[in-house]
Image: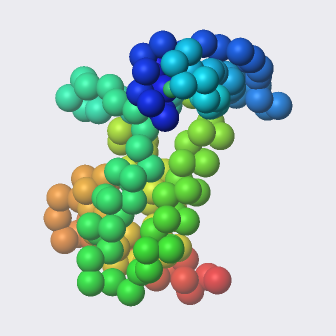
Amino acid sequence: MHCPFCRHPDTRVIDSRSTEDGAAIRRRRTCSKCGRRFTTQETVLLMVNKRSGVTEPFSREKVVAGVRRACQGRPVSEDSLAQLGQSVEEAIRARGAAEIAANEVGLAILGPLRELDEVAYLRFASVYRGFESLADFEAEIQQLKAEKGES
Ligand SMILES: [Zn+2]
């Protein structure tokens, strides 16, 4: 890893310790050229398996971008989108798996999105639940109405 200050390619680890929860290792490094110090962190990357067979690191930004598309024209603030992204990521990480199917990420978005905006939820659900006809939408809308009636 190169020095973030002078970009010199040679840095030395001077201290290395686990974080309190054991989920990461932090390393204190020093640059052999400019002598400045910085800290790096090593964590397990949460990987997403896409249907194409490609695996990529989980990205909260991608979750938010997908939800933002579904929310086009809806009264949903960037703050709410950011909060949704955070709660989806926390829910997925809480499962403790190192890999997750892309479809499961989509499904994890559905719950919080339904709380946020029902129209955006229907748009999103139509993709991730594979709605194929008006009847699928009707069934989902009926269920939304039924749950609203109950509460
Ligand atoms: Zn340096």
Name the foreground residue: 101 vs 125: 101
- Residue 43 in sight in this render: no
Q: Where is residue 39 in the image (x, y as percent from the top left)?
A: 64, 30
Quick check: 145 left or right of 141?
A: right
Corner quadrant of residue 44: top right
Name the foreground residue: 98 vs 40: 40
Quick check: 148 left or right of 143?
A: right
Identify whether 61 is placed above or below 10.
below
Corner quadrant of residue 71: bottom left
Name the foreground residue: 59 vs 94: 59
- Residue 118 in sight in this render: yes
Quick check: 96 left or right of 147?
A: right
Q: Where's the C terminus, which quadrant?
A: bottom right
Q: How is the image coloured?
A: rainbow
What residue lies at 44% left-to-right and 80% top-to-bottom? 77
What residue lies at 61% left-to-right and 82% top-to-bottom? 150
Q: Where is residue 75 in the image (x, y as percent from the top left)?
A: 38, 86
Instruction: Farthest residue to the right: give it.
Output: 20
